[in-house]
Image (cartoon, grey):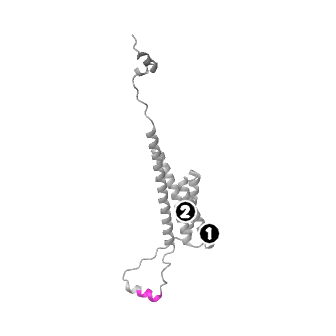
Amino acid sequence: MMTPNQPHRRTEDPLNLRSLPLAEPPRDGWADVEAALLGQARRGRLLRVGGGLLAVAASAVLAFGLLIGNPGSNTAPATSESASALAQTTTEPVPAPLREPPIESLIAMSQQLENRIRAYRSGIGDLPSNVLVYQVELQDLIVQVDEELSATPDSPELWSQRVSLLLDVTRLYENSLRRDYYRMASL
């Protein structure tokens, strides 16, 4: 016999789905998406910090090069009396000043570095955008030094400054190549 509640149950579950066993819902991928986004943000932050440190290092090298390029510019010229008095008071031998390399070798080094930069550009193309800013900045400084060299082509200080700036540009390319190598090696 049917009870008055029985027809009501059939209408609530006409396909008898309540009798099926319970199934676990599939695992969602939001944790993986969140981890990937956090990893990208971390890499971006590291690249920005690395780029900033590279800019600080380039500025320090440039400032150091400018200081070395003009040593003793703020000292008073020595007279023969003060030089003889200094020689009498010091008993230690005074080291000879460092000699700058001849202009010919600086010009040859500058040409070699330019050829190396051309080879890097033809081999790997342009630098990543976060490093390209520093390369453009260094190229602008090289142009300024070139303008000064056009006025005084026999200045060893300017040639030395040009060589150090070209060295900085080659380091940017070499660091980029090194990062690409490590990235490929990690695959």
Three-letter amino acid code at disc 2?
Leu
Residue 187 in view: no
* Separation of residues labelled 2 and 1 (CA atoms): 15 Å
| Structural crowding at the residue carrying mark 2, measured as other residues with C-alpha within 10 Å and reported as few (<14), some (14–19) or many (≥20) | many
Image coordinates of residue 112 in percent, x first then y, are 56, 61
Image coordinates of residue 117 in percent, x first then y, are 56, 57
Q: Answer above or below: position of 172 versus 92.
A: above
Looking at the rendering, which quadrant does residue 102 occupy?
bottom right
* The disc label shown at residue 166, or none: 2
User: Would you say the residues marked 2 and 1 are in contact, meaning their CB atoms lie under 8 Å apart?
Assistant: no
The range drawn in magenta is 79-85
Looking at the image, is mark 2 or mark 1 earlier in the sequence?
A: 1
Image coordinates of residue 55 in percent, x first then y, are 50, 61
Q: Residue at x 45, y 43 (%)?
A: 34
Image coordinates of residue 131 in percent, x first then y, are 53, 56
Furthest-left residue in this view: 91
| Mark 1, secondary structure of its residue | helix
Residue holding disc 1: 147
